[in-house]
């Protein structure tokens, strides 16, 4: 094989991205040098956060460059290894270009084991989704057995994983979601103790009080806004709020206003902390190991949507914004 | 001596407290039992937070009871000891009743050394003021040499101590206060690098950016509200906000609104944490020791107002609300 297909950023999207923002091209495949691997993409992750990297607005990760390849989390097979830790036939995951075949440094790749879990799981429950849930909850939330965990955006890929991990760790777990179906799913599929449908609940503050009678010790926040305002009235002394997402206020054009958190934080000696998953990069291998163990033991479940074909990667990404996926969206190359 | 004077809560204040809320009485002095000390009050601390304990609204500390003595931090002399750690003539500090003489458990008292610092200092710079500044800054703020520390309410007793400790620890320190005189004092008396007068500054966000050109790593927040909203735009990755007070919004009758903090916390992997000084009770002795050392070395300065006479304790307390004190207010019994 001498050439590989690749997908480049063709132009920066204004508003919702479309196919014109992507460009297909080919390039020659270089020889791997010492310490490098020749890799064949097997599963490619498409994620909403990639939209942010397509813009050049300042953010916590640098933007993609126009006419350069898009990158995301990829599971790949080792075709040739010049790094001692890997051999031909191994599978790895890492941030890789959208290419069928490419060369990468072995030190940037993590070996994954297809005996322990399906390879696609390393992009979701054993990838960023699972690590965000596990490390956000454990490193910032610091949950203790018997405490109450409240999760907003609970039916999402991260939220549903957070709730399941909460149950494994012996917490009372309550989830907030937007439809009765989702609330049912939280309880039946993911083992949450209680759920709240914020769209049909008039008084969120009271609903949280009722479902969390001992108060909230850990709040895993995916939404911000009014829901998080209501949570403030129910936090316990020494409670921890894991600020993971603020989906309810991302698209507001002016700076959104909410209840001042300071008096609540003082009264309850309470902590709020934001994070991105790269903050805990040194804990990723241990996190994946723990998640894989729980998955193997049948303690964790997840949903995913698998599209097929390298050429369909951009469309799978665009489909995310139409809500065509259920759970984690991946493309089998 | 058989009898002691004492000061009781006569009634709960509505709005601003006055003399009618206090009542003088006498009682017989009991004999100290095993483990107890007979104590003579030397300096009594009067503090704004006592106003909260005079009400019966729920708070982080239980309210005073009507017809029971008011309590505050007191430095006392040991008249008689039935506890191995103390002897006659020692001085101690602790939460004690407003009485001239009383019996207390030795285990609740901390020995203080009048050779190391004036006894009144144990109520301020070596008491709650100093501990609030030192433990809030070090335990939550976790400052590192070379970082930038921003302090709001910087001219107050806590704020001016925070700034001085920041300088001792090798930080760039910027203070926010409400008059040009206070800003001058921050720089001349307390060694702050820069000051901002929020009453004469139109664009706080820009003023903070200008005085903190490398961004804010630690924000010690005594005020909340608009000032803290402006700080959010200037926080650095992994910054820590020590939420110590929210004086600007305590008296609002409805729940005050501010910029939603969540998007800022996520973008900067940033932490906000509230506290009260009792959260760090196990670290008080070490804190007092460190503060006393800096005081002895001339690295810390403070101001205090000393009133005289046991009978003047209520008036000294009331004077706090008229701003008659400069720095920490104490009464020499």
Image (cartoon, coloured by chain):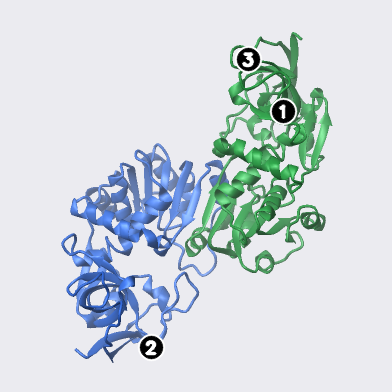
Chain colours: A green, B blue
Image quadrant where residue B16 sits? bottom left
Identify residue for label 2.
Answer: B67
Q: Which mark is residue A82?
A: 3
Give neighbour class at mark 2: few <14, some 14-19, many 20+ (Cα, 10 Å): some
Are discs 3 and 2 both within one chain? no
Position in image of residue A199 (x %, y %): 75, 59
- Compared to residue B49, the image places residue A167 above or below, namely above
What is the chain identity of the residue bearing mark 3? A
- Residue at left offset 36%, top offset 58%: B283
Q: Marks 1 and 2: CB-CB under 8 Å?
A: no
Looking at the image, do the residues carrying marks 3 and 2 touch, with CB atoms under 8 Å apart?
A: no
Q: Nearer the viewer, mark 3 or mark 2?
A: 3
Callout 2 secondary element: loop
| A234 left or right of B138 in image | right
Please give the chain letter of the residue carrying mark 1.
Answer: A
Q: Are marks 1 and 2 on the same chain?
A: no
Q: Nearer the viewer, residue B181 or B3?
A: B3
Q: CA distance from mark 3 to mark 1?
A: 18 Å
Q: Tell which tag, 1 or 2, sits nearer the viewer.
A: 1
Closest to the observer: B190 or A29? Answer: A29
Label 1 sits on a secondary structure element that is strand
Please indicate whether residue B3 sits to the left or right of residue A152 in the image.
left
Left or right of residue A211: residue B257: left
Q: Position of residue B32 (x, y in %)?
A: 27, 83
Q: Nearer the viewer, residue A174 or A98?
A: A174
Nearest to N terminus: mark 3 or mark 1: 1
Q: Percent x, y for residue A241?
A: 57, 54
Provide the secondary structure element on which disc 3 rests. loop
Mark 3 Cα shell of 10 Å, populated few (<14), some (14-19), many (≥20): some
The chain letter under disc 2 is B
Quarter the N terminus of chain B occupies: bottom left
Q: Quickly name the residue at label 1.
A: A75
């Amino acid at each position: 094989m001498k050439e590989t297909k690749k997908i480049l950023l063709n132009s920066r999207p204004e508003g919702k991205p479309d196919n014109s923002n992507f460009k297909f091209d080919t390039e020659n495949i270089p020889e791997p040098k010492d310490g490098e691997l020749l890799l064949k993409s097997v599963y490619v992750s498409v994620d909403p956060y990639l939209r942010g990297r397509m813009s050049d607005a300042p953010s916590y990760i640098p933007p993609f460059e126009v006419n350069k390849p898009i990158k995301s989390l990829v599971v790949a097979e080792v075709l040739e290894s010049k790094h001692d830790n890997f051999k031909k036939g191994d599978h790895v995951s890492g941030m890789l270009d959208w290419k069928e075949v490419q060369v990468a440094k072995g030190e940037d790749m993590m070996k994954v084991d297809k005996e322990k879990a399906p390879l696609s799981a390393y992009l979701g429950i054993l990838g960023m989704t699972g690590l965000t849930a596990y490390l956000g909850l454990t490193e910032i939330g610091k949950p203790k057995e018997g405490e109450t965990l409240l999760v907003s955006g609970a039916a999402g890929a991260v939220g549903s994983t957070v709730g399941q991990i909460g149950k494994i760790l012996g917490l009372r777990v309550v989830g907030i979601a937007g439809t009765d179906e989702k609330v049912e799913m939280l309880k039946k599929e993911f083992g949450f103790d209680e759920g709240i449908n914020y769209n049909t609940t008039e008084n969120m503050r009271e609903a949280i009080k009722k479902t969390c009678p001992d108060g909230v010790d850990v709040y895993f926040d995916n939404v911000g806004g009014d829901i998080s305002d209501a949570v403030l009235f129910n936090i316990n002394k020494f409670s921890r709020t894991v600020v993971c997402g603020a989906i309810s206020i991302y698209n507001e054009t002016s700076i959104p206003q909410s209840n001042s958190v300071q008096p609540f934080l003082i009264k309850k000696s309470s902590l709020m902390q934001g994070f991105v998953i790269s903050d805990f990069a040194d804990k990723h291998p241990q996190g994946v190991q723990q998640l894989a163990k729980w998955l193997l033991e049948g303690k964790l479940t997840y949903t995913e949507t698998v599209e097929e074909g390298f050429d369909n990667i951009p469309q799978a990404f665009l489909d995310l914004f139409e809500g065509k996926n259920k759970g984690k969206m991946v493309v089998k190359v």
